[in-house]
Image: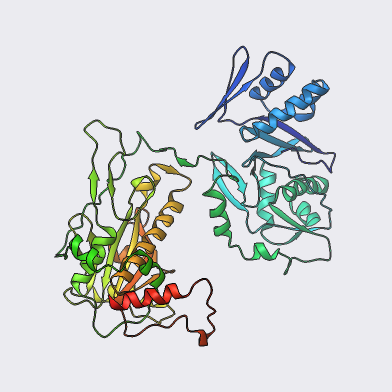
């Protein structure tokens, strides 16, 4: 980044990041990081010399450009634009380097803003301050750069911005460490980069935030910026960050000890003969929060779990094979055949299965009792009921947990996002199977991961809940959720849903 310079005390430096290895040969330069190599064709000459200087130390940008001719300046600036993520930019104010910038996106175009001594400033609510590689840094999903707080004065200034402050008050509280002009210059750089908000004297911050930003929670926008490429510069995807250092988790979870209930195994012929078909299940899918008088049966639970989540195949590499090669297959898809999701059933009412909390063994196709405490069972069901605004008192609660390291051993930057994608896929699979079987399904949006980890006997950081789904027997009659008298407006062939309803009633 090369911001504007509203204050004469500001000077900009540029150099390579510490984690970049620079190697020159006769006609090119290779820039290598832990995850990639960038090769630039660059023969001998002053542009090559200027680039080599950046490998030794941070140098003033003006000095680097002044030693080049007009055409060479253009070439050098274009080159810096191409390798921006490999560079670090220092900001000197009053002769001291206070902060550094690292690009986290390709198209960085921010410039410093002019900040006056009587302006009001505060840290953006989207700004994140954390430790990274031994340095305190500022990051934000609104910014395309990372700020390294290299000087104590910069760290103290950032710490003072938790609440609205006048700029000259910040300078006064700095005890002379930063003059007012220096504070204005530093804040101007941080405002331009998107980390600090500013208002003229006499204005306030109440109700001023952009209505789009007001509808973003901090953690949601940060999550969005980190799990897809574009605004973050760290490794993303299947880079196997722990290969050779940590053993991968097994594809099949060891079954916990406890009394077990063998489940009914449906036959393929029976299922295909009575199945209503994919279109009927899709069009007839509904969410139910009330149930029929008769409970679900152990046979129905057995068929549902067999069709939704059983392990179908198991591949184990030969001795000496590549670590992480063990995979399984289940009826729903996952990235890399990870199948990190596990199912636990909290059963309140089911003919043939005693109330309790069970683990579903997807290989042995059985339920294993992991907790028979009535209070824990009630606590699990209570959270599920609250998620439905207490419309439902679930007969069966299916808790989906993730064995996180099954994904994070292979994926960097997207492991948790991937497990949430898998959870959504499993929700849809459960909805379709439950609909085809004439059950009453409902996916839930809220759960208590901490409480469920305790109840299920899990380590919160290794395996905890990421989704919840409730089941029961379907109540009599049509739910009528698309009743036009209630305001529903039919569009795009509503007869599909009507047809599906009639098909499902016959099944």
For the point 54% across and 79% down, the residue is 489
Q: Is residue 291 above or below residue 364?
A: below
Q: Is residue 352 above or below residue 56?
A: below
Residue 254: % across, % down: 22, 52
Residue 373: % across, % down: 23, 73
Observer able to see residue 408: yes
Q: Is residue 374 above or below residue 432?
A: below
Quadrant in the rendering for residue 398: bottom left
For the point 77% across and 22% down, the residue is 72
Residue 452: % across, % down: 34, 66
Q: Nearer the viewer, residue 352 or 102?
A: 352
Q: Nearer the viewer, residue 165 or 252?
A: 252
Q: Residue furthest bottom?
A: 485
Q: How is the image coloured?
A: rainbow
For the point 62% across and 17% down, the residue is 28
Quadrant in the rendering for residue 424: bottom left
Quadrant in the rendering for residue 189: top right
Specify the quadrant that holds the N terminus: top right
Specify the quadrant that holds the C terminus: bottom left
Q: How many marks?
A: 0
For the point 65% across and 62% down, the residue is 213
Does residue 11 appear left or right of residue 366 in this picture? right
Does residue 229 appear left or right of residue 272 in this picture? right
Residue 228: % across, % down: 53, 48
Observer able to see residue 370: no
């Amino acid at each position: 980044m090369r911001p504007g310079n509203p204050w004469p005390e500001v000077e900009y430096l540029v150099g390579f990041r510490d984690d970049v290895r620079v190697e020159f040969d006769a006609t090119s330069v290779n820039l290598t990081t832990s995850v990639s190599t960038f090769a630039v064709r660059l023969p001998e000459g002053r542009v090559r010399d200027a680039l080599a200087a950046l490998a030794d130390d941070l140098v003033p940008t003006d000095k680097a450009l002044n030693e080049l001719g007009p055409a060479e300046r253009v070439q050098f600036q274009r080159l810096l634009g191409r390798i921006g993520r490999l560079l670090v930019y220092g900001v000197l104010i009053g002769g001291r380097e206070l902060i550094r910038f690292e690009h986290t996106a390709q198209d960085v175009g921010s410039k410093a803003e002019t900040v006056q001594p009587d302006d009001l400033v505060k840290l953006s609510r989207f700004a994140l301050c954390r430790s990274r590689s031994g340095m305190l840094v500022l990051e934000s999903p609104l910014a395309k750069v990372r700020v390294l707080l290299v000087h104590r004065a910069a760290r103290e200034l950032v710490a003072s911005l938790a609440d609205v402050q006048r700029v000259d008050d910040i300078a006064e509280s700095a005890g002379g460490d930063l003059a007012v002009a220096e504070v204005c210059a530093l804040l101007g750089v941080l405002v331009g980069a998107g980390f600090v908000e500013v208002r003229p004297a006499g204005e306030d911050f109440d109700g001023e935030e952009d209505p789009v930003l007001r509808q973003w929670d901090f953690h949601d926008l940060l999550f969005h910026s980190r799990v897809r490429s574009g605004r973050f510069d760290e490794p993303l995807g299947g880079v196997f960050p722990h290969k050779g250092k940590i053993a991968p988790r097994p594809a099949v979870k060891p079954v916990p000890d406890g009394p077990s209930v063998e489940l009914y195994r449906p036959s393929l012929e029976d299922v295909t003969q009575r199945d209503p078909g994919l279109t009927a299940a899709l069009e007839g899918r509904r969410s139910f929060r009330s149930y029929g008088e008769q409970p679900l049966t152990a046979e129905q639970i057995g068929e549902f779990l067999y069709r939704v989540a059983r392990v179908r195949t198991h591949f184990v590499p030969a001795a000496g094979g590549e670590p992480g090669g063990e995979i399984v297959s289940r009826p729903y898809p996952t990235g890399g055949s990870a199948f990190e999701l596990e199912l636990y059933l909290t059963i309140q009412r089911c003919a043939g299965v005693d109330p309790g909390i069970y683990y579903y063994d997807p290989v042995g196709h059985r339920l294993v009792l992991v907790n028979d405490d009535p209070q824990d069972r009630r606590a699990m069901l209570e959270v599920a009921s609250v998620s439905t605004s207490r419309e439902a008192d679930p007969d069966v609660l299916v808790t989906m947990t993730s064995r996180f390291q099954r994904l994070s051993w292979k994926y960097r930057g997207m492991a948790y996002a991937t497990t949430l994608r898998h959870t959504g896929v499993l929700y849809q699979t459960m909805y379709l199977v439950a609909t085809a079987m004439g059950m009453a399904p409902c996916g839930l949006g809220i759960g208590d991961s901490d409480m469920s980890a305790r109840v299920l006997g899990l380590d919160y950081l290794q395996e905890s809940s990421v989704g919840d789904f409730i089941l029961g027997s379907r109540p009599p009659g049509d739910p009528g959720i698309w009743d036009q008298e209630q305001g529903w407006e039919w569009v795009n062939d509503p007869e599909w849903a009507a047809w599906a309803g009639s098909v499902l009633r016959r099944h």
